[in-house]
Amino acid sequence: MTKGSSEEIRKVDALIVGSGPAAAACAKRLVDAGYETVALERKALPRHKACSGILSPRGHRFLIENFGPLPKEILHTPSSAVGVTFHFPGMLSLSMNFDGGPTPHLHRKYADHWAMRRSGAEIHDLTEFTELQDKGAYVDVTAMKDERTVRYRARRVIGADGPGLSVVRSLYPDYAGQIPWFVVGQKFHAVIACPLDDRYFHFWFHPQLGHYTWSHARDGKQLVGVGFLKGENFDVRHQRVVQYLEHRHQVKLGPAESPEIVPANFGGSLINRYIFGKGNVLITGQAAGFFNMIAEGMSCALHSGAIAGEAAVESFRNPADVQRTYRAMIASEVRRCSDQWNPLEIAFGRPHEADFRGALNKLKVRERLSVLREILSFIKLYAPLNWGRQILRHSVYRQVLGRYDSARWL
């Protein structure tokens, strides 16, 4: 026995790694069904989470229906957003209101903790998952708390730890090295002058600024964010955006403060390369590859997490292959998420919760063509990743068969 270790094993029905939206939704389904559930979080709760905090209408409905009315202490100021504004290099801007009205601007530090506590699961914070062994009838999990080894035995384990991918790495050690990684960062600025409408989340389709670039108001300051392939300098990319906003939009900001930088496993939902686990271990939320367009991941994390919980419950009640059950159930969320990136769905359907096609049709023909050209130019930014043909192939597959190819999923 190593120093500080303990051989005591905590036995539970389900062990969830993570304490974000996917973990909370998963835990809620399991606890409501009467199964003993423990969630591990490596940080002290409530923990900080770098995020825009703008939730989609679908995610808003899920929170209210499953966790109850949102208390004001889990919201930023402004407390809501009415929609999203797309900006293009030619200086055309399209503002679109969210379906169903404004949605909340969540303070993730408190919103995540609120949902996790409302789930009813037992939460073990300052407890870091380290490894697992799937024994067939159960999964043995090892974690560290206060430099002491702690052990769990669970019938099902759910990895809901976002881009940390700790559970994924236990199942597929080489996976993280085989996918492209992005840096996503944001800084906060005092506002000197900002003509951008603070009721909206602002997003720029501009290839020279970054793979995704955004800005919105928060707690009396202006948040400016940029995402790009790992390996470039965040401060340089961020300053380029700040200068662009001043030059093209007359946004004058004070010095940057409180930078937040996180890695992102961005791309699974674009190319239908999700990872759902194996054996008694399920992967959900951003760890599985779910990420809505405009980098909103909370709503698909909530729904995919709930589905993971439902699949685990179903496997307890009617013994069957939990992976087969989960993959059959999760296909609907794959369709909803991947449709947001699917050019054919965008062109001929309405996959988003703000009417882009309607806003586009209000423009003059010349303006519409300009916007479409600039979107195409923006998409070319992803060409080095060789995603274009994959996106097109899966888009056609979706149109013909009404679903995405599950053979692509790990």
Image (spheres, grey):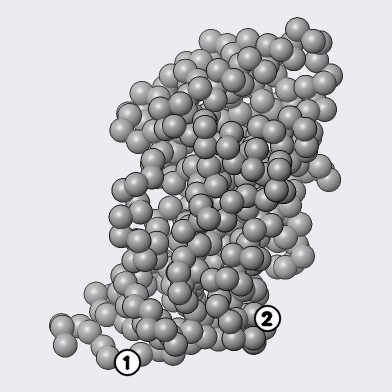
- Front in this rendered view, residue 5 or 259: 5
Local secondary structure at mark 1: loop
Q: Which label is found at residue 32? A: 2
- Residue at 75% in and 7% down: 366
| Nearest the eye: 279 or 148 | 279
Q: Which residue is label 1 attached to? A: 8
Residue at (35, 51) in percent of width and height: 176
> Is 349 placed above or below 382 here?
below
The label shown at residue 183 is none
Camera-side residue of 40 and 367: 367
How many other residues sit within 10 Å of disc 1, few (<14), some (14-19) or many (≥20)?
few
Image quadrant where one finds the N terminus: bottom left
| Amino acid type, mark 2 | Asp
On screen, residue 292 versus residue 231, left or right, reads right
Q: Is residue 167 left or right of 205 when viewed as pictured?
A: left
Mark nearer the N terminus (1 vs 2):
1
Q: Is residue 226 above or below residue 304?
A: above
Residue 360 placement (x, y as % from top left): 78, 22
Q: Position of residue 178 (x, y in %)?
A: 34, 47
Q: Residue at x 57, y 71 (%)?
A: 324
